[in-house]
Amino acid sequence: MAVVLAAAACGGGGDDGPATSASCAPYADYQGHRGTTVSVSSSIRDVEADKLAKAWEAFQACTGISINYTGSADFETALPTRVKAGDAPDLALFPQPGLLTSMVRAGALKPAGTEVVANVDRWFSADWKRYGSVDGVLYGAPVDANVKSFVWYSPKYFAAKGYTVPKTWAEMLTLSDRIAADGVKPWCAGIESGAATGWPVTDWLEDTLLRTAGPDVYDRWVEHRIPFDDPAVVAALDRVGGILRNPAYVNGGYGGVDSVATTAFQEGGLPILQQECAMHRQASFYSTWWPSTAKITEDGDIFAFYLPPVDPAAGSGAGRPVLGAGVFAGAFTDRPEVQALAAYLATPEFADRRAVSGDIVSANKGLDRSLLTSPVAKLSADLLADPAVTFRFDGSDLMPATVGAGSFWTEMTAWVKGTPTATALHRVDATWPA
């Protein structure tokens, strides 16, 4: 209701002058572009796209800048085609810095404007600025963020069966064996995602590698300073296979191991509500896909626990490892209204609007975390702000797009279907650009 009222109150400005309503005060720096339109494209769609549109409603009403938004399931593959055809959007919300980098290398993206850079310097850490930069130049302003190191489960079901949340990987496997012995598949999963089919397995591998080999090896792997099929990576994927390719463990509610590749990622964890499986590893944003009737709380129908470390005592030097990702706003044009929108997206005001409209988390230092209502969103924001956490950005998102949004996805899909671990990883390594 607050967003709707603000939008209604902001329409009093002239054709070029600023709106006078107090509700429009946060948008004073973006005036002078009334009557213009900015086209925006990303992979955010369906209910998430509605939340995004609601977050910039007041910006549109107060500035007079119209936002023409398109969300596509095939965004990663369609964007390069559009750019090559001369049909690029004004602004894209990149879920993969690797794709952003490829657009920079193609000469398509514009460097971030002065106001965008100033906002990023003020409100984001140096790491987050680096993720949106190429050769030290900022091209993409951080917008949303998410935490991927979560396992979804049902606290009510755990309590009824006497299960406890595992604190180590070994405890997680012991729990899995116990659940299987009780006649329920402990895990359910789905990796189908249109042209992006396979990406949930890349998350599994990255989260596991960060826990087994540590952040230094992880960084060298992401940057291809060690081969993609390095023994440490093979070992990590084999560890993942102990769950995802284990017929005793998956795929509750859907069938055998082969059903993992054909089950939509949005539906992957839903059998938990029917007690047909017990656990589902997926990012914080998966909260969107639970039915509105499901109570997402620490003692409710659904909640999430932190994917435990392999060895919390000795470990790999990773401390408390957390894998995450985010969205970056990159502009294909330097028109002033486009730069104005890009600058706004990097502000605490927009981060707060995202929190209010959709419980969306941001790494923006100015985010008012009290606006988040979901316990999982609050937990995610706390992890992102925790100095004791060893945070690493999703590896596939940082890799060259031909790998991170290409061969890595396809080969992990083939791996789920039975391709040997070393073979699948070697095939990805062979596609790395020279």
Image (spheres, rainbow, N blue to C red):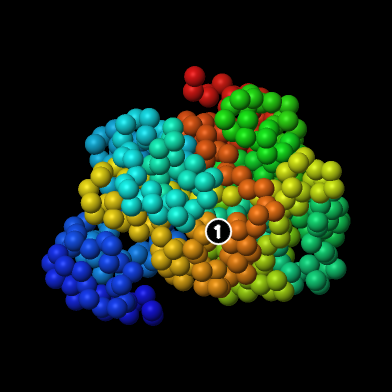
| 35 up-or-down from 402: above or below | below
Q: Residues within 10 Å of mark 1 (few under 14, many from 20)?
A: some
**Would you name the residue on which mark 1 appears?**
285
Q: Residue at x 81, y 72 (%)?
A: 160
* Residue furthest left in the image: 15
| 48 up-or-down from 139: above or below | below
Q: Quadrant of the N terminus?
A: bottom left
Q: How many marks?
A: 1
Say which quarter of the image contains residue 221: top right
Q: Where is residue 103? Give x, y as percent.
A: 37, 35
> In this orientation, does residue 335 appear?
yes
In front of the other: 322 or 407? 322
Q: Where is residue 248? Give x, y as percent.
A: 79, 48
Residue 155 is left or right of residue 294, and the answer is right
Could you tell me the amino acid type at mark 1? Phe
In front of the other: 218 or 418? 218
Q: Residue at x 31, y 46 (%)?
A: 113
* Residue furthest top in the image: 434
Q: Where is residue 4? Give x, y as percent.
A: 33, 77
Question: What is the secondary structure assignment of the residue under circle 1?
Answer: helix
Say which quarter of the image contains residue 219: top right
Q: Where is residue 229? Give x, y as percent.
A: 66, 26
Q: Residue at x 24, y 54 (%)?
A: 337
Q: Residue at x 25, y 40 (%)?
A: 87
Residue 164 is left or right of residue 388, and the answer is right
In front of the other: 38 or 258? 38
In front of the other: 95 or 259? 95
